[in-house]
Image (cartoon, rainbow, N blue to C red):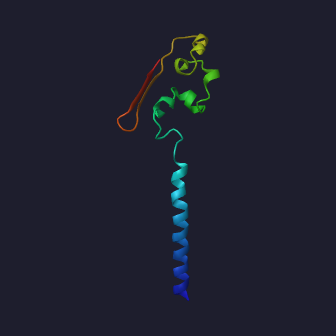
Amino acid sequence: MNKNLLKSAILISLTAILFLVPRTSIYARSPDAGLPGAFLRFGAGARSLGMGKAYVGVSDDASATYWNSAGLTQLTQKEIVALHAILFEDTIYDFVS
């Protein structure tokens, strides 16, 4: 009896692993990953990326040169933004404004 219970527990565990593990990697993918020119859609500036790239209407800092250059008229002082990211396959993403 215990032998059958152990076999069924192992079978249920293996079945659960086979169904759950492959699906977790599906959710870890980015919609931009693996597409040609995906590095052009990364964005610039921590504030804008923190807002989920929804920064076009609020661009009022130095990263406005990337998102909406009309936002440069709202600057009250001199600012500088620098971004350096080492990506995949020897791709480097730099932005300075």
In the image, farthest residue toward the bottom: 1
Q: Quadrant of the N terminus?
A: bottom right
Q: Is residue 25 above or below residue 42?
A: below
* Residue 27 position in % (x across, y down): 55, 49
Q: Which one is nearer the viewer's eye here, 6 or 79?
A: 6
In the image, farthest residue toward the left: 90
Residue at the image point whose x is 55% and y is 63% from the top = 19
In the image, farthest residue toward the right: 57
Q: Is residue 4 above or below residue 26?
A: below
Question: Is residue 66 toward the left or the right of residue 55 in the image?
Answer: left
In the rendered picture of this protein, how many numbered marks are placed on residues? 0
Question: Is residue 10 toward the left or the right of residue 87 in the image?
Answer: right
Q: Which one is nearer the viewer's eye here, 24 or 5?
A: 24
Q: Which one is nearer the viewer's eye here, 25 or 3?
A: 25
Residue at the image point whose x is 61% and y is 23% from the top = 56
Residue at the image point whose x is 52% and y is 21% from the top = 66
Q: Is residue 86 above or below residue 21?
A: above
Q: Is residue 53 above or below residue 25?
A: above
Q: In the rendered image, which quarter is residue 82 located in?
A: top left
* Residue 54 position in % (x across, y down): 62, 29
Residue at the image point whose x is 61% and y is 12% from the top = 74
Question: Is residue 68 toward the left or the right of residue 82 in the image?
Answer: right
* Residue 40 position in % (x across, y down): 48, 29
